[in-house]
Image: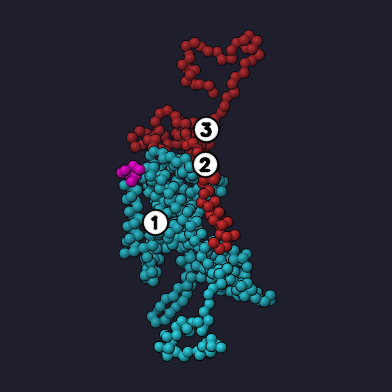
Chain colours: A cyan, B red
Amino acid sequence: MNVAAALIAVIGMVLVVWLGVGVLKLYTLFGVVIPYAAFLIFVLGLIWRMVNWAKSPVPFKITTTCGQQKSLSWIKHSRLESPANNFEVVLRMALEVLAFRSLFRNLRADLRGRRLYLGSSKWLWLGAILFHWSFLIILVRHMRLFSYPVPGFIQTLNAVDSFFHIGLPHLYLTDVTILAGLTFLLLRRLVDAKVNYISLASDYFPLFLILGLVISGMLMRYFLRVDIASVKELTLGLATLHPKVPKGIGLIFYVHIFFVSMLAAYFPFSKLVHMVGVFFSPTRNLPNDNRRVRHINPWWEGVPPKFLTYCEWQEKFKDKLIDSGQPIDEDCYKEKKS
Amino acid sequence: MYNRDKVIPGIIIFVLFVAFPIWWGHGKSVPPPNPELPKGKCVESKEYMRSQHMQLLNVWRNKAIREGMRIYVSSDGSRHWIGLQNGCMKCHHDKSKFCDRCHTYAAVQPYCWNCHIPPEMKKFKTPQPSFLLRLFKIPPKLKAVQASSEEAEHGEP
């Protein structure tokens, strides 16, 4: 059911483009207005997210650690597993973001007969790192369509990515790896009964959306060719704020740009926002220095919290305490009398 | 807002990163490429050539080099000699005014020229009148009255 809903939503998008561009010829709407609107939603939505998270107080220092913390000078502490200062936090965060270190510790638990087996499971890490790195390289590579003159490193990236010169236009290696990664991440949700049980439509939808994005892009590059010079005229027009829509770009391009617009607009309001959320994780972005630096709960800054003494509390719930036969502390009343 | 000193630089870096296409081009519009088209008809339609010429060239390369097949039958039934220097470049003489215009615009680096040599575009100097011509005030280019149409066809170098 969840899978079907997500799949229908993505197929519906193709139909929307077919209807809007193929039948109603709304080139400006699909080529200029929707991409601009989606980009604005993406940027403003993510800034709103960041400000919102930055406004949320962190009452406790809850760094997750799995190593020796810094204590006495002659005990070696684990700089990455239990960072003692901000520099070590940055190191750990960088490895988390770039190498998915915590995912690398992924374990599996299987019941075989009546015995529980725990073991290492690196497949999720492999699929995730294939997908995320491919996506990043593809995104950076696309900047050749949004910049003129094209920066040298983007051209170098292009040349490296198409290193094997397979076919013409050359097959990009990241196109293959992102398909492999996405296929794994999707099959994992479909095949593994435990993951399938906890998967919602909002888990399948981004997968199908990005899969549609990748497939439409690959179709456009390798099979249903479009004129790249006209495409760049449109994309460069968007980037230089002089939008115009050249004639004669195939429908597949509008499907591709509609998918990417929907992805950008959906981004800040979905689980995909983990892109910025990872930097706001209190378990990752705080040093483990609880024993040296006092963490003051931001709620207590300025405004002293109102405490109840035991006697005040007892007075508040006195009838309930008596009803349930709890002992009453008589000392409270003695002090009041004196 | 907590941790302003870290969150605000983070937001600025994020915005600069996603706005790269906008500040890189300074908002200046770039004219679309205009490759110089020779007169006559190409092997396939203009639209087909614009979007699919690289795939056609790949097929041509495989046919000519690997299969020794040098005749291409186009979709309208006409026959063409398969070749880059002896085919395409016969009409599209100048690589820099045809191929490179779009390729530079779209940042495409085709590897045709790893093996092929683009036709040399030699620029001839304008003829300088010799001493004798100057002495007798004879114009360096003699113009025949009837041949004015031929002159217009060749044009100035």
Mark 1 chain: A
With respect to residue A322, does A283 lie above or below? Answer: above
With respect to residue A35, does A288 lie above or below? Answer: below
Location of residue A66 in the rendering, given as x and y in whole percent from the top left corner: 56, 74
Query: Which quadrant of the figure contains the N terminus of chain A?
Result: bottom left
The front one of B89 and B13 is B13
Give the residue number, with chain letter if any, for mark 2.
Answer: B27
Cβ–Cβ under 8 Å for marks 3 and 2: no
Furthest toward the right, the residue is: A74
Of the image marks 3 and 2, the number of the one nearer the N terminus: 2
Mark 1 vs mark 3, CA separation in Å: 47 Å
Give the residue number, with chain letter if any, for mark 1.
Answer: A209
Number of numbered tags placed on the structure image: 3
Residue drawn at (44%, 83%) of the image: A317
Give the residue number, with chain letter if any, for mark 3.
Answer: B119
Furthest toward the top, the residue is: B136
Relative to A221, A104 lies left or right: right
What number is the disc on residue A116?
none
Mark 2 vs mark 1, CA separation in Å: 31 Å
The front one of A8 and B19 is B19
Q: Amino acid at mark 3?
A: Pro
The kind of secondary structure element at disc 3 is loop
Reply yes or no: does residue A4 show up in magenta. no
The kind of secondary structure element at disc 2 is loop
Q: Amino acid at mark 1?
A: Leu
Whether marks 3 and 2 lie on the same chain: yes
With respect to residue B77, does A221 lie above or below? Answer: below
Q: Can you tell which of label 3 and label 2 is closer to the viewer?
A: 2
Q: Amino acid at mark 2?
A: Gly
The front one of A96 and A302 is A302
Q: Which residues are magenta?
A: A20-26
Mark 3 vs mark 2, CA separation in Å: 37 Å
